[in-house]
Image (cartoon, helix red, strand yellow):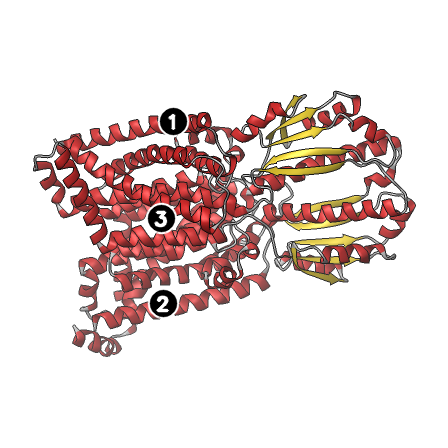
C-alpha cells in the first residue's frame, strides 16, 4: 500500500488532464449515488433541517407576549382603576384583577402568573398630593431571569404610557420626558427573525460536519477508504471527491431552509442571494474540513459522531452568539469563541436576512472562514495520507 | 428471579464501565455540559457597546452621557459626532444601541417641555437590544426625574418598586444550573439505554440473551434498571455541583426531587428502550436518541419559556417528560415547591413511563417472537 500511495502522484502526472477530470467525476458520481441511496444521509440532510427549522421557528421564542399577571387593587379608587385598565389594555399582558396580593402568591409559586402588580391603597392620595411620589410594587417570578427582565420592562412601559397620557390630558408636559426607542432591522421585535437565520447555521454545521464525519468514518471502519487509497487515485482527489458532493448537499439544505424561512416564517430577506451563497459556501469549507478531519482521526463512527456533536453542533449552538450573547460570557469562554467558525457566519447570515449586503463585514468573515477551512482540509489530507502510509 | 436479575444488572454495569466508548459517554458530555452551559448559556446582557451622538447645545446632554458611562452594564460608551458613523456602528454590529440626544434637550428640560432622547437598537439581536433599551431608558428617566426634582419641577410620576421573587438578583446560573439536572438525566438515561440494547443487537449477543433462561420482562428490567441507577448518580453529582459550586439556594426537599427523578428516569429509559428496539445498529440508536433529545430539550422550557410558543405547540409539550421534571428541578431548588405541586408535575411522568415502558416491552416481544 505504501508503494501505491507513493507512486500515485507520479502516475498522476503521466495522466492527461481530461483523464483526471474523468476520474474525479467518477468519484463524485459514486459519492452522490451513495448519498442518494443512504437513508441516513437523506435524514440528516433534508429531514433533520426541516425539523430543526420548525423547532426554532415555532418552539424557541424569546418573545414574551401576553404574560399572565395579577393586578392587585388594594383599594379600588378611580385612579388605580384607571391604571389597572391600562394593564388590561396592554397587548403584553393577560391580567386578572384581585384585591389582595395573597390571592396571587400561590399562583406565582406554581408558575400560574409571571408577576403581580400591586397598586397600594394610598395610590390616589399620593398621586394628587404634590411632592409625594406614589409607589407601585411589582413582584416578578425571577426563576427565568430573561422573562423577568422583559416583564419588568413592559410593566414600566405601561405605567410610563399611562403617566404620559394623563400628563397630556392635564397639560403637564414635563412628565412626558424620557426616551423613545426605535428597533432597527426588526421593528416588530420578533425573535424568530434572528433565530431562524441562526438555525440555518446549525443545519449547515450538522450536514457539513456530522454527516460527513459519520459517512467517511464508516468508510474507514469498513476499510473501503483504504481500498480506495490503494487505487491510483491520489488522496487529494479522494478528499475532493468527498468534499464536492457534500458541499453541494450542504448548499441544498441551506437553500431548503432559506425557502422555508422566507415563505413560511416570513423572515425578511433584505440582502442578495449571491451574498447568501458566498457566506454559506465559505462556512461549508471549515465545516466539511472538520468532518473529514474527525473521521480520519477517529476512523470510528461512534467516536466520530460524538466528536462532531461536541466540537461542531454544541459550539455552533452555544458559542456563536446565535442565542446567547458572547459579551455576557466569562472572559475565558469569550476568547474561545473566535475559533468557532459559526461565530463568523451568524452575524453575516443575520445581516443578509435582516439588514442587507454589508460587504465589509462579509469580506472579513469569509476570509476567516476560508482560512479555517484551508487549515482543516490540509490537516485532513495529511491525516488521511499518513495513516495509510 | 432475583438472582438472575441481579446478575444481569451487574453484567450491564460492568459492560458499561469497561467499554471505553461508554466510559467516554458517561464522563465527557456531562462535564462539558456542566461547564459550557452553566457559564456560556446566559441570556443576560452585560458588557455591551453603545455609541452616543450628543447634539445638545446645553450641558444636560453631556451629563446624561456621563451617567451612561458610569453604568456597569456597558463595556464601551463611544461618543460620535456624525450620524453616519452612528449608523455604521449599528449596521456593522460594533454597537448594539445608539443614543441620539437632540439639540434642544437642555432647553426643553428647563422650559418644562417634553425633553426626549432617541435610542436606536440593533434588532438583529432583538432580545438583547430590548434589555439594553430597558437599561438606557431607566438611566434617562432617572436623570430627567433628578433634574426636575433639583429644579423643583415636581411631576408626580409613580415609582415602580420591583422585587424579583425566588431569584432576587436575576442570576442566570440559578435558572440554568437546576435545569441542567433535568437535561443530564434525560441524556444519560436515553443514551445508556439506547446503546446497551443496540450494541448487543449489533454484536448478536442479544439473541443469546433471548435464548437464556431469562424471561422477556426480566431482560427488560435488567436493561432498564442500570441506566436508572447511572442516571441517579449523575443527578447526584449535578445536585452537589448546583449546591456547592454554583451556590444555588435549595429551598425545597431533596427527597421530593429524587422521587420525581426516579419516575422521570423510568419514563426516559422507556423512550430509550423504544428507540433501541427500533434501531438495528448503534449508529441508528445514536441518531434516534439525538432526534428525540433535541426537540425534547427545545420544547421543554429549558432555554426559552413554553408560554412563548404558539398555543398548538404548547399542547404538544404536554407529552414531553422533560418539561415536568424541569419544573420540579427548578421548583424544588428556587421556589421550595411543596409536595402537592411536585406530585402534580410527577403524575404525568408516571403516565408517560407506563406508556413508554409498556410500548417498549410490546415491541421487544414482537421482535423476538
Helix, strand or loop status at disc 1:
helix
Which chain is disc 2 placed on? A
Structural crowding at the residue carrying mark 2, measured as other residues with C-alpha within 10 Å and reported as few (<14), some (14–19) or many (≥20): many
- Other-residue count near label 3 (Cα within 10 Å), few / some / many at <14 / 14–19 / ≥20: many
Quadrant containing the N terminus of chain A is bottom left
Q: Which residue was labeled with disc 3?
A: A45
- The residue marked by circle 1 belongs to what chain? B
Residue receiving disc 1: B348
CA distance separating discs 3 and 2 = 21 Å
Quarter of image, res A22: bottom left
Q: Are marks 1 and 3 on the same chain?
A: no
Q: Going by the image, does B76 lie left or right of A247?
A: right
Determine whether, in the image, residue B180 is placed left or right of residue A325.
left
Distance of label 1 from label 3 (alpha carbons): 35 Å
Q: Dot 3 falls on which chain?
A: A
Q: Residue at x 57, y 42 (%)?
A: A145
Disc 2 from disc 1: Cα separation: 49 Å
Amino acid at each position: 500500500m505504501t508503494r501505491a500511495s507513493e507512486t500515485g502522484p507520479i502516475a498522476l502526472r503521466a495522466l492527461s488532464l481530461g483523464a483526471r477530470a474523468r476520474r474525479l467525476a467518477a468519484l463524485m458520481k459514486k459519492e452522490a449515488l451513495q448519498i442518494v441511496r443512504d437513508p441516513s444521509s437523506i435524514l440528516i440532510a433534508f429531514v433533520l433541517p426541516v425539523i430543526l427549522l420548525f423547532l426554532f421557528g415555532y418552539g424557541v421564542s424569546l418573545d414574551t407576549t401576553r404574560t399572565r399577571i395579577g393586578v392587585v387593587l388594594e383599594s379600588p379608587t378611580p385612579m388605580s382603576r384607571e391604571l389597572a385598565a391600562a394593564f388590561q389594555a396592554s397587548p403584553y399582558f393577560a391580567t386578572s384583577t384581585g384585591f389582595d396580593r395573597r390571592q396571587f402568591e400561590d399562583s406565582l409559586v406554581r408558575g400560574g402568573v409571571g408577576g403581580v402588580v400591586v397598586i397600594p391603597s394610598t395610590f390616589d392620595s399620593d398621586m394628587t398630593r404634590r411632592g409625594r411620589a406614589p409607589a407601585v410594587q411589582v413582584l416578578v417570578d425571577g426563576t427565568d431571569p430573561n422573562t423577568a427582565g422583559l416583564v419588568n420592562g413592559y410593566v414600566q412601559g405601561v405605567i410610563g404610557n399611562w403617566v404620559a397620557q394623563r400628563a397630556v390630558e392635564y397639560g403637564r408636559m414635563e412628565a412626558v420626558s424620557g426616551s423613545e426607542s426605535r428597533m432597527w432591522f426588526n421593528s416588530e421585535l420578533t425573535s424568530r427573525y434572528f433565530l431562524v437565520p441562526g438555525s440555518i447555521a446549525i443545519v449547515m454545521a450538522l450536514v457539513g460536519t456530522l454527516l460527513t464525519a459519520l459517512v467517511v468514518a464508516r468508510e474507514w471502519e469498513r476499510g473501503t477508504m483504504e481500498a480506495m487509497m490503494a487505487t491510483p487515485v491520489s488522496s487529494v482527489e479522494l478528499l475532493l471527491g468527498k468534499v464536492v458532493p457534500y458541499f453541494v448537499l450542504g448548499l441544498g439544505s441551506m437553500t431548503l431552509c432559506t425557502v422555508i424561512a422566507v415563505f413560511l416564517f416570513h423572515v425578511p430577506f433584505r440582502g442578495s442571494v449571491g451574498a447568501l451563497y458566498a457566506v454559506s459556501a465559505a462556512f461549508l469549507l471549515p465545516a466539511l474540513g472538520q468532518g473529514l478531519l474527525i473521521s480520519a482521526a477517529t476512523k470510528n463512527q461512534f467516536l466520530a459522531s460524538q466528536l462532531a456533536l461536541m466540537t461542531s453542533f454544541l459550539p455552533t449552538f452555544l458559542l456563536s452568539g446565535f442565542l446567547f450573547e458572547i459579551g455576557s460570557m466569562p472572559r475565558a469562554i469569550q476568547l474561545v469563541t473566535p475559533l468557532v467558525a459559526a461565530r463568523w457566519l451568524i452575524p453575516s447570515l443575520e445581516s443578509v436576512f435582516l439588514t442587507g449586503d454589508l460587504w465589509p463585514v462579509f469580506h472579513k468573515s469569509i476570509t476567516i472562514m476560508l482560512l479555517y477551512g484551508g487549515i482543516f482540509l490540509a490537516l485532513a489530507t495529511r491525516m488521511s495520507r499518513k495513516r495509510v502510509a | 428471579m432475583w438472582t438472575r436479575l441481579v446478575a444481569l444488572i451487574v453484567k450491564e454495569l460492568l459492560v458499561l464501565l469497561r467499554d471505553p466508548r461508554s466510559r467516554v459517554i458517561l464522563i465527557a458530555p456531562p462535564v462539558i455540559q456542566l461547564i459550557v452551559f452553566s457559564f456560556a448559556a446566559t441570556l443576560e446582557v452585560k458588557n455591551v457597546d453603545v455609541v452616543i451622538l450628543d447634539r445638545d447645545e446645553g450641558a444636560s446632554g453631556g451629563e446624561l452621557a456621563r451617567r451612561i458611562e458610569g453604568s456597569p452594564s456597558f463595556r464601551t460608551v463611544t461618543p460620535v459626532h456624525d450620524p453616519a458613523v452612528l449608523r455604521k456602528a449599528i449596521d456593522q454590529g460594533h454597537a448594539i444601541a445608539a443614543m441620539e440626544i437632540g439639540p434642544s434637550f437642555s432647553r426643553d428640560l428647563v422650559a418644562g417641555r417634553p425633553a426626549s432622547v432617541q435610542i436606536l437598537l440593533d434588532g438583529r439581536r432583538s432580545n438583547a437590544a430590548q434589555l439594553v433599551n430597558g437599561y438606557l431608558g431607566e438611566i434617562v428617566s432617572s436623570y430627567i426625574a433628578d433634574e426636575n426634582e433639583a429644579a423643583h419641577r415636581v411631576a408626580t410620576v409613580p415609582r415602580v418598586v420591583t422585587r424579583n421573587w425566588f431569584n432576587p438578583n436575576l442570576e442566570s446560573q440559578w435558572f440554568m444550573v437546576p435545569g441542567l439536572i433535568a437535561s443530564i438525566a434525560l441524556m444519560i438515561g436515553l443514551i445508556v439505554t439506547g446503546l446497551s440494547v443496540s450494541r448487543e443487537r449489533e454484536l448478536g449477543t442479544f439473541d443469546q440473551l433471548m435464548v437464556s433462561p431469562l424471561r422477556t420482562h426480566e431482560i427488560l428490567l435488567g436493561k432498564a434498571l442500570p441506566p436508572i441507577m447511572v442516571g441517579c448518580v449523575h443527578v447526584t453529582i449535578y445536585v452537589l455541583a448546583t449546591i456547592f459550586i454554583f451556590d444555588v439556594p435549595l429551598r425545597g426537599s431533596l427527597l421530593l426531587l429524587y422521587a420525581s427523578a426516579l419516575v422521570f428516569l423510568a419514563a426516559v429509559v422507556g423512550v430509550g428502550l423504544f428507540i433501541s428496539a427500533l434501531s438495528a445498529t448503534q449508529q441508528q440508536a445514536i441518531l434516534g436518541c439525538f432526534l428525540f433529545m433535541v426537540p425534547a430539550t427545545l420544547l421543554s422550557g429549558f432555554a426559552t419559556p413554553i408560554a412563548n410558543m404558539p398555543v398548538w405547540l404548547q399542547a404538544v409539550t404536554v407529552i414531553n417528560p422533560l418539561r415536568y421534571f424541569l419544573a420540579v428541578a427548578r421548583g424544588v431548588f428556587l421556589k421550595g415547591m411543596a409536595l402537592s405541586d411536585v406530585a402534580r408535575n410527577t403524575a404525568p411522568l408516571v403516565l408517560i413511563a407506563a406508556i413508554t415502558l409498556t410500548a417498549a416491552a410490546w415491541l421487544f416481544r414482537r421482535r423476538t417472537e
